[in-house]
């Protein structure tokens, strides 16, 4: 299993770090990818993270999941990256898992990928989920698109994604190991 987590200046740290940790515990190969011109990416609360690779240097072949953390500025920066949006389109076309949390589901909405799909986002971004059926849940799965409300559900969201990719037993084992 291969997961790619995209980092842009202004990303919400908890929404990126929690899934990195949970995915690695599940033995999912995780690559953090900077869409900036440098590997060091600064989060919305000033925490700097060194990404594993730059977008331009990454081989996305055989990706099982593309994960977009939120944060207002981080989401704006991700949305401005044409290469990332092309990759998201290809992932959707190939019937592979897409995940977005907080403000990041707005990227999928603007791309038309949420038309007729149930979704959720951080309060105030609902108008950007074009064509989506908006729910009040904290985590929503609609086909192969997974969305979540915000930082407070980062661990639960990552566990749901592990359940999708590796099964309920693996997700439960990890949840038990971290005292959820």
Image: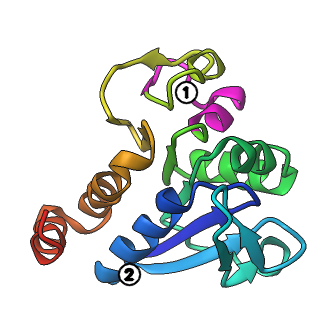
- Colouring scheme applied when the structure was drawn: rainbow
Residue 39 numbered tag: none
Judging depth in this view, the residue of 156 and 62 nearest the camera is: 156
Helix, strand or loop at mark 1 = loop
Give the residue at x 42% y 44%. 144
Quarter of the image where the C terminus is located: bottom left
Q: How crowded is mark 1: few (under 14 residues within 10 Å), some or many (20 or more)?
A: many
Give the residue at x 34% y 72%. 22
Q: Residues within 10 Å of mark 2 (few under 14, many from 20)?
A: few
Give the residue at x 61% y 46%. 93
Helix, strand or loop at mark 2 = helix
Q: State which region is magenta.
A: 105-119
Location of mark 2 (residue): 24
Mark nearest the camera among 2 and 1 is: 2
Location of mark 1 (residue): 114
Return the x and y of residue 97 as percentages of the image width and height.
47, 53
């Amino acid at each position: 299993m291969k997961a790619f987590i995209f980092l842009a200046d202004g990303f919400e740290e908890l929404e990126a770090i929690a899934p990195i940790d949970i995915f690695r515990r599940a033995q999912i190969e995780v690559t953090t990818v900077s869409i900036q011109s440098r590997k060091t990416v600064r989060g919305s609360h000033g925490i700097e993270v060194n990404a594993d690779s730059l977008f331009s240097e990454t081989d996305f072949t055989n990706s099982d999941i593309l994960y977009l953390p939120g944060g207002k500025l981080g989401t704006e920066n991700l949305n401005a990256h044409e290469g990332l949006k092309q990759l998201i389109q290809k992932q959707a076309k190939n019937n592979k898992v897409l995940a977005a949390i907080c403000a990041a589901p707005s990227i999928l909405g603007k791309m038309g990928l949420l038309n007729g799909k149930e979704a959720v986002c951080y309060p105030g971004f609902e108008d950007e989920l074009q064509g989506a059926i908006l729910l009040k849940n904290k985590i929503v799965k609609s086909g192969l698109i997974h969305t979540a409300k915000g930082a407070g559900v980062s661990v639960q969201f990552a566990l749901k994604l592990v359940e999708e990719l590796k099964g309920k037993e693996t997700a439960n084992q990890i949840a038990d190991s971290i005292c959820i």
